[in-house]
Amino acid sequence: MNNGKIRVGFVTSSLLLKTGFSSNARALIPYLYKTEKYEIHHLNQGVGDDPQLQKFPWHNEGTYRKGTFDETRFNNPQDEGYRRHVAYGNCAVEDFILRNKLEVLILEEDGWAYDINTYLKSKWYSFLKENVVLHTTSDSLPILPLYKEYAENCSNVWFWSSFAEKALKQENFEKYKHVKTVHGCTNTKDYYSINLEEKLRLRKEFNIDPNTILFIQLGRNQLRKLYPQTIESFAIFKKQNPIINAKLFFHLSFSEGWPLERLMKENGLNKEDVLVTYFCRDCGRWEIKPFEGEDKDCRYCGIKGLPGIPQDPRGHGQITPGVTSTISNKEMSKIYGIADAAVSVFTSGGLELFSVESLLCELPLLCSDYSCGEDFTCNDFVFSLDGNYTYEIGTGFKKHVPNINTMVNFYKTICNLSYEQRKEIGNIGRQWALKTFDVSTIGPIFEEWLDSRKRINWDYKYPPEKLKNPNAIIPNIQDNIEWLKIMYKDILNMDVTDEDEGLKGWLFRLKQNQPREEIDKFFRQVAQQKNQEITQQQNNEKQAKFEDLLDNNGKKRFLIVCKESIGDCVYCLGLLKSFRKSYDEKEWDLYLACDPIYNDIFIGNEYLHKVLPYQNFMDSEPFCIGQGNNLGLFNGFCHVTAMSQKFLNYLTNDNIDLQLTE
């Protein structure tokens, strides 16, 4: 696998999804790949091995990798925590690292997605830790304790926004002096301002008055995105300025989050006061119109709107766009371009890409002056949304409550500006966004860091993993937690804490009256399976080391196995000429494996390419020629002493009649 390039692994959102992290990955991964210095591997969170992943030139795989997680538990709708645990890659990451022999690991997700036990307390992390970077978002004060634990145990913690870095350094500069701000990036070339002619053409297509001032708010319909305040403030603005021609424009899914239709009615807005984007799940075309519900007929392809059902979960026709939207970034520039200004209102955020994209499309921006918003509102070309603060129940996080009057004044200010004045503000914002968030700024930071990493010598060995004990005798302990901990320790050789996800899962099952006998049986089955995997891994390691003895000259390899005895070795000599005639030397190299004490019998033989030391795995023809995920080291195989010493073999025989003599 090693072609001299640094093997870099990403654990982040799938590029097939529409999230802030996938947007960052769509810019950063291609940038690094195109340098031709790195061998890129991407563990795509939240997907299986989707065939669409193969369209990318680097190696991709999904987090739902069979055999890495408990499928029974995953399919339990009541165990949502475990489902998230699997989706974020916590069960697949170790296999991902070891199988691909990664030298660097880049983690791009909210910090809570990466389980502390899976990462910081794993044996692979102790080996790889200096080459791990957590490039993450932190959205609220106080900073989560888990970010502090990462910062105390990882020398490369980079935040997408500066407020988290400032907060940690103010708390304890010496402890957190290594953390820094590296913004998330995006494909800035995909976002641009459309000209006035294109803007008016699109408005005409969607029956939007060319003189209407449109205020866009775009993003997930989440509780931390303050759409209710946008609706409330806009309703006040409309009442105060009834003759001004203005509308709200939402690009989001009405099927999640806030009950937007109800909020519009409660605040006295008409259906026509708020426009939304629809896209067709069948033809991909989009349009802008007042909200009319989901699963609507498509006016472009004519398909009838139908909701998803188990047999056809995607459904048909038009819906409002969420994370499954198929609208491209370049088409999004047109959607931004139809609007006149942007409203980015949130309780907190790690980095709102909507704010970035709005500026790239040259829209005047109103932005919450808190958390990630501080990186925007410190510029005089961004309208700062002041407000008060509240504290979230449970977490105690500080959350922003926007000043409704400031929002009303923003609408009024924008409506009083000419098109040229809005463009002037927008142009300044675009230039700043390009310098701050373009991959040409962020990519070199990663590139410099990657090039400074110490290469990993993958000849290292973990301490040999102990075999499990499927026959362990478990005492009858009444306390479920203690009983499970002993099950883990005595059968699986594992020490677990009360916070372990696996322990929590079994406690849940016991509360659901699953018999202890079934759990006991499962633990022992896992132990037996794990022992098989350990044995297989040991064989793989031997094979990997043994591979260095083989030549990569473009020829196929045929392995003849004759481990023992001296008599059989002498008989085998008589077969070599016939083997050579049967397997053309222009296409095949003949290798012979024997006990080293018999080397002298074969070394120098004119028909052999090389004599190899016998290895235990050579008793298995399927293992030598390849089976399942094992590609095998040889193309042909014959264990010539099998009938006298071992078992049936020579399954690769191509009806060749070997003769001891001509």
Image (cartoon, rainbow, N blue to C red):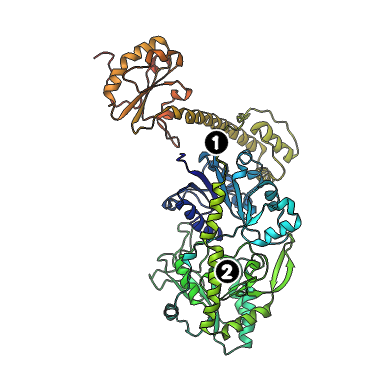
Q: Residue at x 47, y 41 (%)?
A: 4
Amino acid on which disc 1 is placed: Asn
Q: Residues within 10 Å of mark 1 (few under 14, many from 20)?
A: few
Q: Amino acid at mark 2?
A: Ser
| Foreground of the two, 499 or 420 | 420
Q: Is residue 244 visible?
A: yes
Density class for disc 2 (Cα within 10 Å; few <14, some 14-19, many ≥20) is many
Total marks shown come to 2
Q: Nearer the viewer, residue 190 or 11?
A: 190
Foreground residue, 547 or 535? Answer: 547
Helix, strand or loop for disc 1: loop
Depth check, mark 1 against mark 2: the one in front is 1
SS label for mark 2: helix
Identify the residue at horizontal 28%, vertical 19% (top origin): 578
Separation of residues labelled 1 and 2 (CA atoms): 43 Å
Which quarter of the rendered picture does the N terminus lie within?
Answer: top left
| Residue located beneath label 2 in the image | 355
